[in-house]
Image: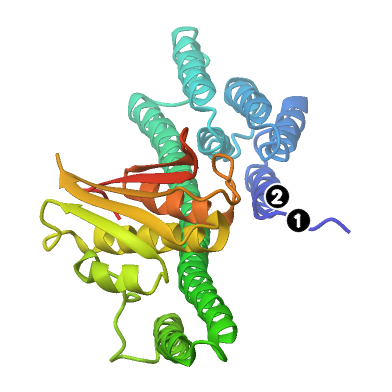
Amino acid sequence: MRRLTTGTVGSLAVIAVVVAAVAITWAVRPDRQPNILDVLLPLIATAGMLLRERYPVLALVVVSAAVVAYYPFARLDAPLIFLPFVVLYTAADRGRLIAAIATGAASLLAMGLGELQGTRHVDDSTFVMIAGWVVAAIAAGGVTHNRRAFLREAEQRVRDAEHSKEEEARRRAGEERLRIARELHDLLGHNISMINVQASAALHGLKKRPEEAESALRTIKDTSKETLRELRTTLGVLRQVDEDAPTAPAGSLARLDALVETSGLSVRTEVSGPLDAVPAEVDLAAARIIREALTNVSRHSGSEEATLTVSNTSGNIVIRVEDAGPGVTFTEGSGFGLQGMRERATALGGSLDAGPRPEGGFRVTARLPLNGAP
């Protein structure tokens, strides 16, 4: 069963009051003999009241016309005058402000013309009071309409803000997952590759050159220890349970010799410009790119030598890693290592180029602006 709305209940209450008022007026004024309009016009006006929720303009016209016609031609003079105020308010409240103003003005004009023709039953003060109530009803409806529109707009802004906040949270979560993936790839991929290389060297020289095997095993021990430490640091930051752990994995241009040493390669290093005042974000990205590039040389080039050039010039850190090995080369942008290096560079507003050299081997060139945004 369809539930009655608040507006419908209010309309029924108004109709009941009107019917009671007409009946009471008829009872207390036996000297006045009612005509057909005393019954017909109140019925039309009350029927129009039932339309005000769904058809406010139609209800406005019907009720106003019935009430304006009631007082000059009916005989009982029942209190129907408040009905137009209700429908004027409803029309303005539903956003039909122009229709409400036009109908109110037309009703007042009809009452004025009735005075000129001698058919109006209200004096000047009553007419002014009615005009004031017409203006007040329309104004009140307009205020409630504007307030409701403002609340809807405010609610929509809140929903949009919540949606934007959720989108921002999802975007940040995605970026954080990519950052963690890069860190773990750089950490585990490099160090485990070094462990694999040194283990192979130790096995190869265990019987023939024990001193070299001992050196390789010592390198494996140091590398695995460093891997565990950095992995513990990274996991501690993720879990937020290790307050004494550094907030970023180790790696810095200030420790360039350590980066080169752990690569297991014979690296010719050239440094140009100061590297001790590099911003932390650029410093970490540069160290990660160097380590990943050297790891790729060790794993894929087939060469045991590489050239590393690091320069600080024109507001940029420029890194170049080259090898002359005949091993596997990548196409532009292939491989997670190259992808991670490129993402690190572009995140700082820089760039990274990687590809085969014309004279053989492979080259990685990265440019990192010193004022790059993290």
**Residue 293 versus residue 336: which sits nearer the camera?**
293
The front one of 288 and 92 is: 288
Q: What is the x, y in percent for residue 338?
A: 50, 51
Q: Quadrant of the N terminus?
A: bottom right
- Tell me where residue 271 sits by quadrant: bottom left
Q: Residue furthest front?
A: 208
Label 1, label 2: how many angstroms apart (C-alpha)?
A: 6 Å
Q: Contact (CB < 8 A) between labels 1 and 2?
A: yes
Q: Give the structural element (helix, strand or loop) at label 2.
A: helix
Location of mark 2 (residue): 8
Q: Amino acid at mark 1?
A: Leu
Query: Disc 2 residue type?
Result: Thr
Kindly give the residue lying farthest to the right in the view shown: 1
Q: How is the image coloured?
A: rainbow
Residue 366: numbered disc: none
In the shown orientation, is residue 44 left or right of residue 341?
A: right
Q: Secondary structure at mark 1?
A: loop
Q: How many marks?
A: 2
**Which residue sits at x=46%, y=37%?**
357
Q: Residue furthest top?
A: 117
Residue 76 location in percent, x, y? 64, 34
Report the residue marked by disc 1.
4
Percent across and percent down for residue 121 are 49, 24
Picture coordinates of residue 277, whole percent (x, y): 11, 61
In the picture, measured across the screen, residue 61 lies left or right of residue 353, that is: right
Which residue is at 68% across, 51% downward? 20
